[in-house]
Image (cartoon, helix red, strand yellow):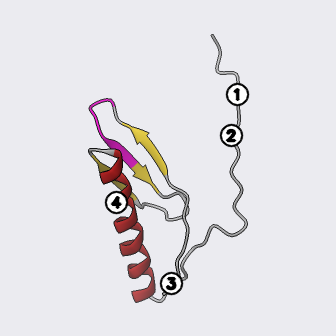
Amino acid sequence: MKVMNYRILLRKEPEGGYTVTVPVLPGCVTYGTTLDEALAMAKEAAELYIESLREHGEPVPTEDGTFEYNLAVNAGA
């Protein structure tokens, strides 16, 4: 079994909990009420997403060639 590493983004929700997205896997979004639950849900969601891709004979995206950078912009006063 090959281990893949994916970058995830977590957003703390105003009503509580965390929404998690996996940018390289379009539409792979999940939620957890705690940080630990959100991370576990993200792992499960990514694994199911990849399983579905493989079942349909589609390529599995990787993070190869992906760079991350935080861009600061002036959003006004």
Q: Which residue is mark 1?
A: 73
Q: Residue furthest top?
A: 77
Q: Residues within 10 Å of mark 2 (few under 14, many from 20)?
A: few
Was residue 58 drawn as part of the magenta stretch in this picture? no
Q: Position of residue 57 (x, y in %)?
A: 47, 89
Q: Which residue is mark 3?
A: 58
Residue shown at 38% from the left, 80% from the top: 52
- How far is disc 1 from disc 2 in space, using C-alphas? 10 Å
* Mark sitting earlier along the chain (3/1): 3
Q: Which residue is mark 4?
A: 40
Q: Position of residue 70 (x, y in %)?
A: 68, 40
* Mark sitting earlier along the chain (1/4): 4
- How far is disc 3 from disc 4 in space, using C-alphas? 25 Å
Q: Position of residue 37 (x, y in %)?
A: 30, 53
Residue shown at 64% from the left, 21% from the top: 75
Magenta range: 14-19
Q: Is residue 20 left or right of residue 15?
A: right
* Mark sitting earlier along the chain (2/4): 4
Residue shown at 42% from the left, 68% from the top: 46
In this view, the mark in front (2 or 4) = 4
Number of callouts: 4
